[in-house]
Image (cartoon, coloured by chain):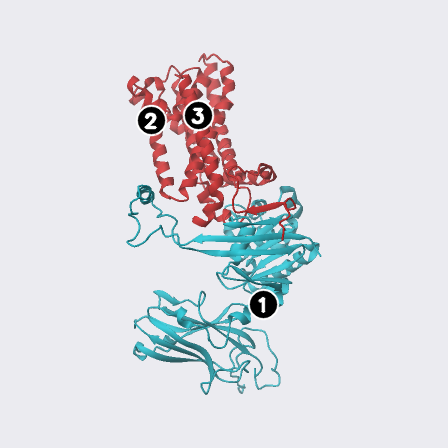
């Protein structure tokens, strides 16, 4: 059994919501004075008792151990506390309670290119960025050729980085980070930048880094494929708590099954808002029955939304966003897309059914989030945040052609029209 | 499970001692300090016509202007010191003081992006600010030294004494006072943004109520006590005393100014140390 290199004990991080204080000195003094003199605080709204200390525990009593050489993928929904946990371990922010012991030196990549100065050349920025990340000058001297080679910008290395394309900038920044020597590497979504080709290379480099030298890695990403290929252990977080601390496969399964379902049996009243109450949200087949999954790509299926509309608005729209398992949006669809009149929606019960095109999506897992907004004005239900979600699992039925029976690469797999023209 | 005290290289805890500075860590990061200095110096004058010549032009122009306005228009005395020397040392010191103070006051806010993403000993930034401002100052002081020597060769008799050895102490004094005030302001600025604006405005006013362009001896008796209460006064008068042997200094003035410097430095470092971790969540 390897040595424990990170040990977290009852870590908690509390964030206060809204502004801390009123942000204005005059009001703060007034509020402080009236509290001191035992009078009611004049800066508070009537009925409020204490200064709005409303907050939440971004991390709530988290304890875990990580052993040397572990590659830990930290997964969870947005707002589960993944990034906060990395920030606390990287010492960028302090925990509100608890303590963490760390053995060995830590390199943390919460962002690539931190501290890059646009006026300085690529070479100068390598030194600056490297030093910010904790490298010594002698260390950078030793590695500079390797860094430049990996970034593939050797001929522009003495040009100020403000003249770089964003791709070059990211490549250079990643090259510095990738050449850090450390016992523990902490990385937050660093692969979410650059083009696909670069991401593949970056992931490969991360793999090399972590497999060699028995280095310990903590990695946060929404891309389950990346996490799966890089990590062996998982830490599944939800609402600031550890749900599961196990192998990465178990964590990913739990993450995907626990949070997503074909129909929302759970209490939907949580999503009620001033415009509508959400009564039902599910996937149905042609006959209106619950969809039995997995489905083939050849059959018709629909998103069914039942809402009780309380207030009409000319900019109101509702629909869904469909994400693939990498967390990328495949497309968005709204009831207003077909230039429908809003009169179609009425106060009271509405049953909306949206078609998902057959033979359009590729084989795989998809997550369908409810999305509703006042167009260009405000979110009512933001699919990127807290939104009800359905899982769709498509397998087989890709085409009628004997040349295409198994999954091809690509986000979509439409069967499109071809014709053979004379001449 | 036990925490195995003493086993860890780093322990992250909710509370930290207000005076835990990780001094040995700062020396680990001396390359970073050096690179911050290099960045500050190298990038200030990129894409400017005069470039680093600004270091020279600034005190020269100011000295000429002050000579015209305060010597010839307002007819203020200079304690028997040649006006060129009097005004140039005044501007150089004041410029050093005010630009160091302004730079320190921005330390937390202007580095919030880096501080929010990477850990390194935060004191490296104020230290690098001191060094880059000191380099600018030394360039300008060298210019002053040349002019000084030129005057001496042309018959300006100044009695050299051990007083000149006080100069490095005086420079340290400027650094400590400006850094103390600057870091204090910097910590408060994370909460009240307008303080940085106010600072720039007040600094330009304070110059006129500090003996920068006139000696303390020119101030009417009745006002003098208010000038002495300005901690910068003691500093400037001592500086000129060290250079020219001229000026009006009293033990009270020096003790008061030194005392102020130590208090504000203490407060500044304490606040900075407290804020460097917390402000990331606030800003």
Vertical position of residue B67 compared to residue A333: above or below? above
Secondary element under disc 1, as helix, strand or loop, is helix
- Could you give the CA–CA distance between mark 1 and mark 3, rounded to whole angstroms? 62 Å
Q: Residues within 10 Å of mark 3 (few under 14, many from 20)?
A: few
Q: Which residue is mark 1?
A: A252
Cα–Cα gap, marks 2 and 3: 20 Å
Q: Are marks 1 and 2 on the same chain?
A: no
User: Can you identify the residue that label 2 sits on?
Assistant: B209
Q: Nearer the viewer, residue A84 or B81?
A: A84
- Position in image of residue A132 (x %, y %): 56, 45
Q: Is residue A118 above or below residue A397?
A: above
Give the residue displayed 42% in from the left and 72% down from the top. Answer: A268
**Host chain of mark 3:** B
**Chain shaded red:** B
- Residue at 48 percent of width and 56 percent of height: A58
Residue A70 position (above or below residue B173): below
| Between discs 2 and 3, the one toward the N terminus | 2
Q: Which residue is mark 3?
A: B259
Is the Cβ of the residue at disc 1 closer than 8 Å to that at disc 2? no
Confirm whether residue A61 shows in the render.
yes
Q: Is A9 left or right of B188, judged from the image as shown?
A: right
Tell me the subunit letter for badge 1: A
> Chain letter of disc 2?
B
Left or right: A125 in relation to A183 = left
Viewer-side label of 1, 2: 1
Indicate the quadrant where residue A410 lies. Answer: bottom right
Colour cyan, chain: A
Q: Residue at x 32, y 25 (%)?
A: B69
Say what secondary structure mark 3 lies in. Answer: helix
Whether A161 is drawn above or below A329: the answer is above
Nearest the viewer among A401 and A1 is A1
Q: Residue furthest right?
A: A1
């Amino acid at each position: 059994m390897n040595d424990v290199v990170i040990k977290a004990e009852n870590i908690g991080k509390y964030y206060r919501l809204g502004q801390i204080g009123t942000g204005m000195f005059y009001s703060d003094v007034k509020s402080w004075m009236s509290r001191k003199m035992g009078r009611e605080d004049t800066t508070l709204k009537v009925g409020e008792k204490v200064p709005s200390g409303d907050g939440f525990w971004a991390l709530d009593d988290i304890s875990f151990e990580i052993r040397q050489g572990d590659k830990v993928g930290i997964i969870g929904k947005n707002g589960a506390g993944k990034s906060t946990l990395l920030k606390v371990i990287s010492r960028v922010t302090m925990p509100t309670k608890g303590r963490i012991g760390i053995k060995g030196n830590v390199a943390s990549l919460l962002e690539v290119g931190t501290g890059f100065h646009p006026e300085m050349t690529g070479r100068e920025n390598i030194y600056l960025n490297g030093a910010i990340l904790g490298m010594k000058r002698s260390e950078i001297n030793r590695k500079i050729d390797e860094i430049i080679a990996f970034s593939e910008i050797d001929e522009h290395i003495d040009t100020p980085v403000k003249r770089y394309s964003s791709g070059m900038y990211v490549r250079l920044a990643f090259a510095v980070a990738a050449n850090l020597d450390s016992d523990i590497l902490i990385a937050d979504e660093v692969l979410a930048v650059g083009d696909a080709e670069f991401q593949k290379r970056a992931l490969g480099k991360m793999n090399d880094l972590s497999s060699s030298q028995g280095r310990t890695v903590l990695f946060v990403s929404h891309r389950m494929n990346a996490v799966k290929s890089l990590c062996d252990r998982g830490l599944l977080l939800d609402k600031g708590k550890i749900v599961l601390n196990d192998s990465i496969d178990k964590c990913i399964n739990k993450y995907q099954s626990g949070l997503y379902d074909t129909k929302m049996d759970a209490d939907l009243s949580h999503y009620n808002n001033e415009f509508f109450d959400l009564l039902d949200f599910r996937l149905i087949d042609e006959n209106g029955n619950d969809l039995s999954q997995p489905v083939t790509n050849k059959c018709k299926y629909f998103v069914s939304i039942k809402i009780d509309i309380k207030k009409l608005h000319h900019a109101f729209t509702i629909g869904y966003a469909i994400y693939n398992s990498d967390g990328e949006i495949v497309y968005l669809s709204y009831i207003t897309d077909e230039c429908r009149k809003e009169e179609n929606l009425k106060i009271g019960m509405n049953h909306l059914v949206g078609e998902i095109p057959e033979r359009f999506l590729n084989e795989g897992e998809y997550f369908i989030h409810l999305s509703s907004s006042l167009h260009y004005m405000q979110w009512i239900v933001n699919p990127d945040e807290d939104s009800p979600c359905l899982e769709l699992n498509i397998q087989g039925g890709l085409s009628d052609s004997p040349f295409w029976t198994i999954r091809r690469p690509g986000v979509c797999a439409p069967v499109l029209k071809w014709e053979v023209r004379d001449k | 499970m036990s925490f195995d005290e003493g086993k860890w290289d780093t322990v992250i805890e909710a509370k930290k001692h207000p005076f835990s500075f990780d001094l040995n860590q700062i020396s680990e990061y001396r390359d970073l300090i050096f690179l911050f200095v290099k960045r500050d110096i190298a990038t200030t004058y990129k894409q400017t016509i005069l470039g680093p010549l600004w270091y020279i032009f600034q005190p020269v122009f100011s000295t000429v202007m002050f000579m015209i306005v305060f010597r010839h228009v307002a007819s203020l005395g200079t304690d028997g010191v040649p006006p060129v020397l009097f005004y140039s040392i005044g501007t150089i010191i004041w410029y050093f003081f005010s630009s160091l103070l302004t730079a320190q006051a921005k330390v937390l806010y202007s580095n919030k992006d880096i501080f929010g993403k990477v850990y390194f000993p935060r004191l490296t930034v104020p230290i690098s600010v001191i060094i880059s401002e000191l380099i600018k100052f030394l360039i300008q002081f060298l210019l002053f030294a040349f002019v000084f020597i030129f005057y001496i060769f042309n018959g300006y008799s100044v009695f050299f004494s051990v007083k000149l050895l006080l100069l490095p102490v005086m420079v340290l004094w400027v650094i400590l006072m400006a850094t103390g005030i600057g870091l204090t302001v910097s910590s408060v600025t994370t909460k009240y943004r307008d303080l940085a604006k106010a600072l720039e405005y007040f600094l330009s006013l304070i110059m006129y109520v500090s003996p920068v362009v006139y000696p303390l001896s020119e101030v009417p008796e009745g006002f003098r006590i208010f000038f002495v209460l300005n901690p910068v006064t003691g500093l400037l008068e001592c500086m000129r005393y060290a250079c020219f042997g001229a000026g009006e200094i009293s033990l009270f003035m020096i003790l008061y100014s030194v005392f102020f410097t130590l208090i504000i430095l203490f407060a500044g470092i304490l606040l900075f140390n407290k804020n460097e971790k917390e402000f990331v969540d606030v800003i």
